Image (cartoon, grey):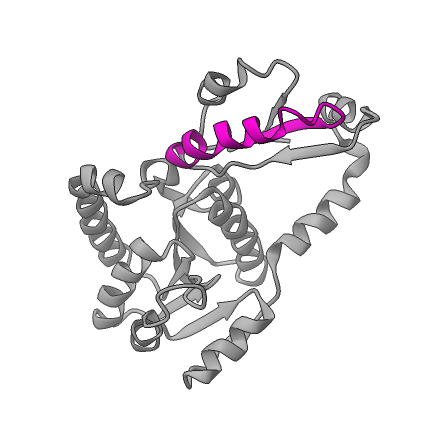
Amino acid sequence: MKYYIIAGEASGDLHGSNLIKELARQDTNAQIRAWGGERMENAGATLVKHYKDLAFMGFVEVLFNLRTIFRNIAFCKKDISSFDPDVIVFIDYPGFNMRIAEWAKKSGFKTVYYISPQIWAWKQNRIHAIKRTIDYMFVILPFEKEFYERFGYSVTFVGHPLLDEVERYEEGAAKLTAEVKDVAADSRPLIALLPGSRKQEISTLLPLMLEAVAPLTNYKVVVAGAPSQGEELYRTFLNKYPDVEFLTGK
């Protein structure tokens, strides 16, 4: 079968890569094109567009990049039509994915959503668009199944993929790098700061996080760097906090 998978963030790249590995295991003839990142590419997909080029956040940033966003949407539709997949799999990233899904459904493509948009938290009226455009929905939180079924839409609960990552971490704990071992060996309790994966998120949240933990000198503080951003972005804020450790790709 031919699969077209669209993920627009680092988390989607992670979960998409595991999906691709399983698809390849079950379907040895699988052909996969994807929007995502290195993880999905390394898992075997032909990478069409990197999520670094898609991460626009907030009204102002979106407004300034409208031309790029519309170009990406047009390109995505054209690429899907050219590839002619048996199924399109959307991973979260609703602002972009729901636009493509509406077009895809009208164009006769089978549509699958893996990791539901958080419409139960906001914009619940999106359920009507989802029912209209998505053939199959796979959710990762138990209450999401009940939520959708209240609206007469049957979905499948598959469990949270991060649980699989925890198992993999535990299995491979002996292979930790020396750098990570040094962090873990610090006798102080550990605080990990995860300020997101988009530049605007990091620029907004990280200074506040660092300011909040600065008085907590009895703790070891580590900032988790997103693979989509270079270390120089983080150093802009970390230079004032020399005791804070920076880690990425670990």
Residue sitting at the far bottom:
152
Quadrant position of the C terminus in the picture: top right
Q: Which residues are magenta?
A: 199-225
Residue 243 drawn above or below residue 46: above
For image coordinates 48% across by 37% down, the residue present is: 38
- Residue 114 position, x and y percent, is 47, 63
For image coordinates 49% across by 77% down, the residue present is: 147
Left or right, residue 144 beside residue 69: right
Residue 217 belongs to magenta span: yes
Residue 44 visible to an observer of this rendering: no
Number of marks in the rendered image: 0
Left or right, residue 116 beside residue 78: right
Residue 165 drawn above or below residue 110: above
**Most foreground residue, 218 or 46:** 218
**Most foreground residue, 236 or 155:** 236
For image coordinates 42% across by 86% down, the residue present is: 152
Residue 126 visible to an observer of this rendering: yes
Residue 215 belongs to magenta span: yes
Residue 195 drawn above or below residue 146: above
Report which quarter residue 98 is drawn in.
bottom left
For image coordinates 32% across by 72% down, the residue present is: 125
- Residue 43 position, x and y percent, is 53, 45
Quadrant position of the N terminus in the picture: bottom left
- Residue 131 position, x and y percent, is 34, 77
- Residue 79 position, x and y percent, is 25, 51
**Most foreground residue, 207 or 85:** 207
Residue sitting at the far left:
67
Left or right, residue 118 beside residue 189: left
Report which quarter residue 217 is drawn in.
top right
Residue sitting at the far front:
215
